[in-house]
Image (spheres, rainbow, N blue to C red):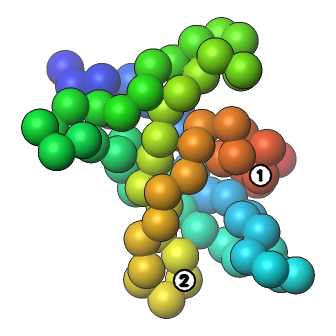
Amino acid sequence: MTPEVLDSLISAEVLLPKGDVLLPAKVIARKLDAEGNLIGRENANPILDTRIYDVQLPDGHVESYSANIIDENIYK
């Protein structure tokens, strides 16, 4: 089983701040480094959670966000 299968943030829908507006977005994957390794590590303490995710915006553009930003903006 891959780590992404167990990752609760994959496919999460979030409202991310862009300037003065909130844009709906979807978490599509964990970010990988140049060697194909996952970037960051999960930690129960949010300050120590360093995971980075690829998030797709409504126009199809993909940006990277930290797990902390995603957690703060996830649909409740």
Residue 76 appears in the figure: yes
Q: Residue at x 69, y 37 (%)?
A: 68
What quarter of the picture does the N terminus occupy?
top left
Residue ID at (49%, 89%): 59
Position of residue 22 measured from the top left corner of the image (x, y, whole percent): 80, 75
Element under label 2? Answer: loop
Farthest residue, direction left: 35
**Tag 2 and tag 1, C-beta contact below 8 Å:** no
Identify the mark nearer the N-term, 2 or 1: 2
Question: Dot 2 corresponds to which residue?
Answer: 58
Q: Position of residue 63 (x, y in %)?
A: 47, 66
**59 relative position to 14: left or right:** left
What whole-number distance in Å separates the C-alpha atoms at marks 2 and 1? 16 Å
Q: Quadrant of residue 24?
A: bottom right
Picture quadrant of residue 20: bottom right
Residue 34 percent location from the top left of the image: 16, 45
Regarding residue 10, the answer to whether it shows in the image is no
Residue type at mark 2? Answer: Pro
Q: Residue furthest bottom?
A: 59
| Quarter of image, res 50 | top right
Q: Residues within 10 Å of mark 1 (few under 14, many from 20)?
A: some
Residue highlighted by disc 1: 73
Q: Circle 1 sits in a helix, a strand or a loop, which is it?
A: helix
Kind of residue indicated by mark 1: Asn
